[in-house]
Amino acid sequence: MVLAAGPLNGRVQALSRYRLETPLVARVTGLPASVLQELRLEESWELVEKIIDLDRGLAVAAEVLEQALFDVIGTLSESPVKPRVVALRRAIHQVRAPRKGEWNEEVTQALPADLVLDLERWLALLGDRDRCRARLPQALADDVERKQEPLRRACAHPLFQNALRRASPALFAEIHKWLADDGRRLRRRTIVGVARYLSRAAAKTSPYSTFTTSVLGDWTDRGPAVGVTGDLAVRGVLELDRGVLGRLVRELAGRPALGDGLPVRLNPSTLVTDDSVSFIGPRPDESIMRVPMSPALAECLRTARQEGDRRTVAELVALLAAQTGADPAQLRPFLDRLVEIGLLERRLPVVDQSERPLAELLAWLRSAGADDAVGPEVVDLVEQLRAELNRPFALDVQPTSRDVPAEQVSAVAARLDLPEPTIERMRKGATHETSMFPHARLECALPRWRPALDDLDVVRRWLALHDWLLPTRLSIASYVGRRFGPGARVPFLVLHQAIQQDLRRPDDECEPWLAELRPLIRLSIPAPPAYLERSGVPRIEELHRLRVRSFDFMLSATDDTGVARVAPQALARLVDSWPSWVRAPGSVACYVQPYLTGDDLRLAVNMVGGGYGRGRSRWLRLAAQAGADQPTPARQAPAPSRMRGTDPVVVEISGVFDYSVNLRAPMAPYEIDYPFTTSDRPDGERIPLSDLTVVHDAETDLIRLRSNRLGVHVLPAHLGMLGDTLLPPAALLLLSAFGPSHLVHAAYSPVYPLDAPDVVPRHLPRVEVGRVTLQRARWFVPVAEVPARAAGEDDASLLLRMVAWLRASGIPQRCYVRVMDPDADWRSQFFSKARKPMFVDFANFFLGAAFEHMLKDRGGLVIFDEALPPPEGGCGLDPADPRVTEFIIELSASEV
């Protein structure tokens, strides 16, 4: 595999079967774990645990006493005290204090002396339990009152305040008033909101503002497992939302007085045949357009291709008129129509990946005479917005009713007469802030990490079989062989069009082979395991059987502690037995939390996605924007000798598609020139979408993607952080058929039994592969089964019932929680906000209140994940101040 060389990728650590790309990245929570620890209940929690222990002891002893009393009752057949002993037994069964008539001297005289002593001890425990219950409400109220001060300290933390101001201005304003007035009390609803954000800031590496700060790092030959050098001062990067920017740029370019001065180019997806021209139309629909060929169109295409993106429509009209003698008055409407349908596309004045987008926009507006076209106020507002976004970063902890960039965006949009709902959406999402430690550097000693990384590489290879998109890839390959013939070479656009047409066909018009494959090539709906089992496609059914054996192998390693401990060597042997069409991913980005067990470093996996610089490229850009001292990334195309053979060359998909999370530093030596994107990379590094050909291998029934111009196979990669399924249709097909996949997602369990795939299990065990925790222990509980507050029930009673239920269910009191609707489609589950886990410590009153609110008026399943490592238990930058720290480690096959 060919990747960029030079400073961008850093020093590569080549190991036996894999290598580590640098820099690695760590994301660190804005608040220390101690913040949540300090909010834990004290006296009331001890009472809760004591009451539950007493209840358990009373229940166990009650069973023994009931049997003993039953035996005594059998000997009292004629005794007048028998009914009282029966009533006493009933009281013991109900775990309540017996009434006076059920426990008195007459009753005790009828019982054996040792049984009386046992009953007296039981009643003493019962009295102790009842006294604890009576004391609990006041103890809880006192604890909550004592926790007001640590709650205030947590909320006053500058990093928390800065992020909260951006995330929820209304909540920030209320908290600011509360912090300024010691006598002020928060409403229950406000407590819930504060608790949710505190949980996020102290227990989740959520990359939003200063809730989380990221730092780059390197592997070293010696030293501690995790160290850091340099200055840990936080710097924020404020970015104008690319959806907002894109809307403004397109709106301005759509004004004839401005847009007519922009150069146009031939749509890079254009596919020309003798009788027609096909291409991908504008987003969001991306309809596949087809225009009949004509001499006039052929000449226009030839000229547009020859001129590149240097000419405006007017200049093309003049060139064509000079070359053909045609009337310019007839040529202009013809070319305008080609621009309208997207065969010719305007080159927008702002590069998608620009680091100075508003400066580029202003330069164009001024050169195009925007004062006359849209008024000087628009230009002035854009200049003010640029200046505001370029202000030096400072932690802002002061309340304000103004969001200046949002106001400026709204003002520009209003001047352009955009609809009010559009203006409101733009105002709400005008900017994004991300924080970095630009002048610090992680140093991770490879010898300490190496054993765990070796096991992680085994996991990488194992994930090949369980790739969500593997059934889709295999099915698309079979589709190409059946639709176009074995060994076919098909332009990518032709394949894209054929799939769209065949997916729209009525069922009764589908041939049997197509009917079997269609459910497997619907990119928006992954096929469920039950369908794979009975798909009728031999290779897909074999895939299902292999997955069943793989999961059975993993789960069969479950020991007496309930943990599946899989030996890496045994798992590697299983992987080596799989057929050649199960190909290990060449590069993966692993999101892991390291922690120590003694001196042994272990890794807990949060997520695994495609590598090749995905994620790293985003943080490299942010670090540079935050002022990090690093060289300018070098884009270096591979030498011809590196491009021979069958290994694919990595090509990244150009464009940001209106999402700021796709802003990144370039990583691959080439990019796919995607329609309606604007790039500043040299023409030699851009591969038009129309240059790509799908090649079917008749022997293996697999397909590869080939660049005709480069003469090599290519691997398309989406290196932005946007979820793949949100990409435009053609890009999604490219990735689904040929690109790297999302392999482990926190919302889904990577290891589960397939004997009843449609049944949600109650519990899944922790799965460890050597030193790597691939799956944390997980519990699935219907919302209706979780204790809910009864009418009039107080906090103490609910807390007691909740903790008792957790114990009985085996669910830890500290865990990560999410809610899932199993009846919702997978896309809703994947992108719903409820899928995001919230850390809950049930000994923390405020987090418990947030949990209660989380389930209010909800249905579906509550998913509880063990907190491994606990917030204070991982390896971080400062052992004296533990913070949840997630590392992004890119691990590639050694031959990549």
Image (cartoon, rainbow, N blue to C red):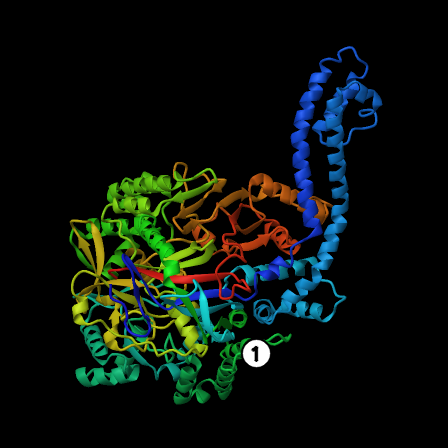
Q: Amino acid at mark 1?
A: Val
Toward the viewer: 53 or 404? 53
Q: Residues within 10 Å of mark 1 (few under 14, many from 20)?
A: some
The image quarter containing residue 71 is top right
Residue 34 point in image, percent of width and height: 59, 61
Q: In the image, is 176 to the left or to the right of 747?
A: right
Quadrant of the drawing holding the C terminus:
bottom left
Q: Is residue 724 above or below residue 98?
A: below
Toward the viewer: 334 or 465? 465
Toward the viewer: 377 or 434? 434
Q: In the image, is 310 to the left or to the right of 791?
A: left
Residue 766 point in image, percent of width and height: 45, 45
Label 1 residue SS: helix
- Residue underneath mark 1: 404
Q: Is residue 267 above or below residue 894?
A: below
The image quarter containing residue 531 is top left
Residue 741 point in image, percent of width and height: 34, 56
Q: Is residue 798 visible?
A: no
Quadrant of the drawing holding the N terminus:
bottom left
Residue drawn at the location 57% of the way across and 70% of the way down:
159
The image quarter containing residue 112 is top right
